[in-house]
Amino acid sequence: MSTTNSATQERTVSLADHLTNALARSFTLGIDAEGFTHHYFRPADAVVVFDGRTLDHYQPLDGRPLREWKSFVSQKRGWTSMGQLAHLGLRVDTERKEARRA
């Protein structure tokens, strides 16, 4: 009589799963021309602007697309760099908010 032990199957988490989970919470939108970091906090649907550890501004979006904030900053201060997940985050935010309006 033989026994067969099956290996415990662990859930494989893909890179896409990691990105989706990260975007579900927050991500850095970018750094403006004045050196301030703009961070999107999805649970509050708000942008937090800070310089190092000092809070500069807190902007609730109240359901408006994050791309509107990106455009506003482009006109007022300009951007020096965008966050690693910014382009994907902007797309996900737009799709999520447009789906709610439909």
Image: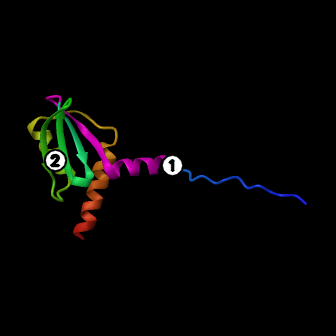
What residue type is disc 2 on? Trp
Please tell me how crowded label 1 is: few (under 14), some (14-19), or many (20+) other residues with Cα within 10 Å. few
Horizontal and vertical percent position of residue 95: 29, 59
Placement of the N terminus among the 4 image quadrants: bottom right
Q: Residue at x 44, y 47 (%)?
A: 18
Tell me the tag on residue 14: 1
Vertical order, 6 against 101 (above or below): above
Q: Nearer the viewer, residue 97 or 53?
A: 53
Specify the color scheme: rainbow
Placement of the C terminus among the 4 image quadrants: bottom left
Q: Is residue 80 magenta?
A: no
Q: Residue at x 14, y 39 (%)?
A: 74
Q: Nearer the viewer, residue 36 or 52?
A: 52
Q: Is residue 14 magenta?
A: yes
Q: Are marks 2 and 1 in contact (CB under 8 Å)?
A: no
Q: Residue at x 16, y 50 (%)?
A: 68
Vertical order, 100 against 31 (above or below): below
Vertical order, 85 against 8 (above or below): above
Please tell me how crowded label 2 is: few (under 14), some (14-19), or many (20+) other residues with Cα within 10 Å. some
Magenta stretch, residue numbers: 13-35
- Between the residue at mark 2 and the residue at mark 1, the CA separation in whole angstroms equals 30 Å
Q: Secondary structure at mark 2?
A: helix
Vertical order, 98 against 11 (above or below): below
Q: Residue at x 26, y 56 (%)?
A: 94
Horizontal and vertical percent position of residue 39: 23, 41
Tell me the tag on residue 69: 2
Horizontal and vertical percent position of residue 36: 17, 32
14 sits left or right of 89 in the view: right
33 sits left or right of 22 in the view: left
